[in-house]
Amino acid sequence: MNLNGIWDFHFAERKFPEDINREQIIFDEIAIVPSCFDAAPVHLYRRGTGIYRKKILCGGRCKLELEGMGLRGSVWFDGKKIGDIFCAFTDSVFRFDAGDKREHEIVIFCCNLFEQTPETQFREFFDFYAYGGIYRNVLLIETDVLL
């Protein structure tokens, strides 16, 4: 199932902590996936965290594939973290059991803040603008086995 299209969205000019209560996040905007939140006029060149939410109907064993996002982030399914993304622009695959077939919630945190660590991929004043957002397709596959 292709999950591209309209997602609920919230932008914050900070890095969100892992232990944030999802109920505290107010999804006061929408965003198109794929796109870059800091290329949209309302958030042009802003650094922070874009938080995307989508409700989907699925169940059983699933594979979620993000074909590219960045600069880094985490993926949550029904309030449980199913994985992290540390490398922008790369394909990331997450396998999990969605449980009963019903409406579920996917939340993706995309942070485009610069980190000053030796292994960081992008730094301030590089000759390439490091966009934040979900750059490519988001796909969900329901399967009998965890591929």
Image: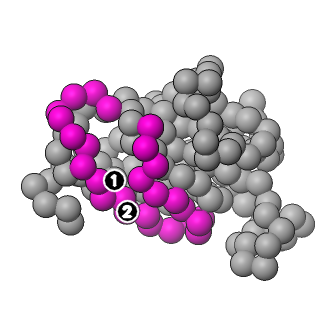
User: In the image, what residue occupies the spot 77% across and 54% down?
Assistant: 113
Identity of the residue furthest to the front in this view: 19
Does residue 114 lie above or below 22 as drawn?
Answer: below
- Residue receiving disc 1: 64
Distance, label 1 to label 2, CA atoms, is 6 Å
Tell whether position 83 is magenta.
Answer: yes
Tell whether position 35 is magenta.
Answer: no
Q: Which mark is residue 53?
A: none
* Horizontal side of residue 129 vs 140, given as left or right: right
- Residue receiving disc 2: 93
Which quarter shows the N terminus?
top left
Residue 43 is situated, as x and y percent measured from the top left of the image, at 75, 36
Q: Secondary structure at mark 1?
A: strand
Residue 104 is situated, as x and y percent measured from the top left of the image, at 32, 32
Disc 2 crowd, CA 10 A, few/some/many (<14, 14-19, 20+): some
* Residue 137 visible, this orientation: no
Identity of the residue furthest to the bottom in this view: 118
Q: Which stretch did the figure color magenta?
A: 79-104
- Using the rendered view, name the quadrant where residue 102 is placed: top left
Q: Secondary structure at mark 2?
A: strand
Q: How many marks?
A: 2
Look at label 1 and name its amino acid: Leu
Residue 124 is situated, as x and y percent measured from the top left of the image, at 87, 64
Does residue 112 lie above or below 27 as drawn?
Answer: below
User: In the image, what residue occupies the spot 21% across and 66% down?
Assistant: 147
Does residue 120 lie above or below 69 as drawn?
Answer: below
Disc 1 crowd, CA 10 A, few/some/many (<14, 14-19, 20+): many
Q: Nearer the viewer, residue 44 or 29?
A: 29
User: In the image, what residue occupies the spot 14% across and 54% down?
Assistant: 143
* Horizontal side of residue 127 vs 27, given as left or right: right
Circle 1/circle 2 CB separation < 8 Å: yes
Q: Which callout, 1 or 2, points at the residue further toward the start of the chain?
A: 1
